[in-house]
Amino acid sequence: MRLFTGGSILTMKRESPRAEALATSGDRIVAVGEAAAVRAAAPGAEEIDLAGACLLPGFIDAHHHFSEGALFSSMTNLHWPAVRGVEELLTAVQARAALTPPGQWVIGEGYDESRLREGRRPTLRELDSACPEHPVLLVQYSYHEALVNSRAHQVVGLPLRRPNPPGGEIGLDRSGQPTGHMVENAVAPFYTRAVGEALARDEAGYMAQLALYQDRLFAAGLTRVYDAAVSPLMEGVLRRAIELESLRIPVLMMLAGGEGMFMPPRERIGAARTGEGDDLLRRGPLKMFMDGGERAAMALPLGIVAGSGLTAIGRMLRRRSLAALRASGGMSGRLDRSDWCVRSGILFYTEAQARELVDEAVAQGLSMAVHAEGNEAIDRALDVLPRSPEDRAPGVGPHRIEHFFFPGPDAIGRAAEAAVATAVQPTIVEWVGDRLLAMGMVGRWLFTPLRAMLDAGLTVAGSSDAPVVDFDPVVGIRAAVRRRAASGEPVEDGQQVTIGEALEMYTVHGARSGGLEHEVGTLEAGKRADLVVLNTDPTSLALKDLDRLTVERTVCGGSDVYIRSSVSDR
């Protein structure tokens, strides 16, 4: 038994938000409240003095590509600013190839062509020249696009020139020649082959990376992750990790198919049910992709598009900058005269196809987690998801919409009425904020509207979408409260939240979004002893002081999994 006293204790329960002490026994909380009562409930407990620090429930990352994040953490890092230009990218790929036996995959992750100094991707010729003896897979930061070389086509058995697959796009240059650029479902055969071979070749290496990756999560105060797209292959790897005692952080799996992350996951329907498993590894909702990544399915009224364009032009003239042109360079759209909306992006399902898949999955005891970024995809998700929580199977957590970036005027209210949970990524506001400002979109169309969503009563679970952006919950909390672009310019749309609300997103709402509110998310007797200790009470800090917030200790299932050393670990 352990007794925590001597600091701030935030229970995250609105009816009793603070306590003087907390006691744990094994993996459970046994008492929370006034110090004398808690001591009486925990006789002989080891006393831990918080020394003025702040104890609260362990953080939950409600949308995190955990199993693949661990895998890619050992691959070639192509993130900006580690790689700032095409030549640096190619040099990094060549360096990895020099350490890799010929014929094995060279895998890199995280490039963003818009941030490279040339403002472009490497060409197929450049990739072939840099890596002639290895198949190459370079995954874009969004994970919805990738670059592959000619040798990769040979290994997978696909010709360079072929029709676009359903829900995918194969890049061609102006002369109609392949570029090696693959979008959405076109990535699938290369991704599944490369990842499958990497895992089959070096299980021990993966388990070592998994251990290191979990250590980083614990150091950030995370005590639970919802793995956002777990294929049957990856589920098998995670179960093997349990056998080897390599998995230490509880994982809720969103179930994806084996043919590719964006493909319809039909093989999972009837073969799995939401809630199966134990606390360490549990099956969650069925994952369904309604639209693309950077090709989010949008339908914007012509007036908004025109107004945004005028704002962008004015901004360019005032700043003497072509940032707006660069920001919109990869976007395209078509005017639909039936409703005078400009449509862009990829929708993977017609309404009938989506409804058929959802109805079948729900009937088989699965909840749904629908990736929907653009307003057209969000509306379609809301059209096909059950409209009442009573439509869920007993004991099954809520249906979810992942990302919810650009909801239309009615979407927030519709989601609230249907009790649909959302998983948002506050840090993405920093990542794309400058782009939205340059394009004149801020103030004309909502992006990740945290304030409006909370005010409507939605469950708004904080998450990262790691490895797309930083998984550190403290970074996400700061982003939710400050609402700034990476440049530091405020995104003045009125959608910032309070520090207390941001903490709830990564605790209370995170638990609720996975149907686990009875187990975690608040500090209550009987709940799992998942705790994080911050150096100070975040609710007492001014916005300018949030950068001082650090994780001092993480407790997962009653065990210390991270204690900050005297020399900063961060």
Image (tube, rainbow, N blue to C red):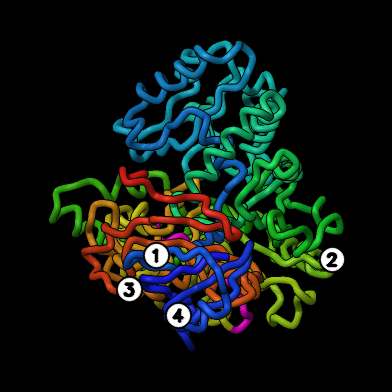
What are the residue bounds of the magenta stretch?
417-427
Marks 4 and 1, Cα distance to the nearest angstrom? 12 Å
In this rendering, the label closer to the viewer, 4 or 3: 4
In the rendered image, which quarter contains the N terminus?
bottom right
Marks 1 and 3, Cα distance to the nearest angstrom? 20 Å
- Amino acid identity at mark 1: Asp
Marks 2 and 4, Cα distance to the nearest angstrom? 48 Å
Marks 4 and 3, Cα distance to the nearest angstrom? 22 Å
Q: Position of 213 compared to 426: left or right?
A: right
Element assignment for label 4: helix
Given the current orientation, which residue lies at the most extreme right position? 270
**Is 421 one of the magenta-colored residues?**
yes
Neighbours of disc 4 within 10 Å: few (<14), some (14-19), many (20+): some
User: Could you tell me which residue is drawn at 51 percent across and 44 percent down?
Assistant: 215
Marks 1 and 2, Cα distance to the nearest angstrom? 49 Å
Residue holding disc 2: 364
- Amino acid identity at mark 4: Ala
Residue holding disc 4: 35
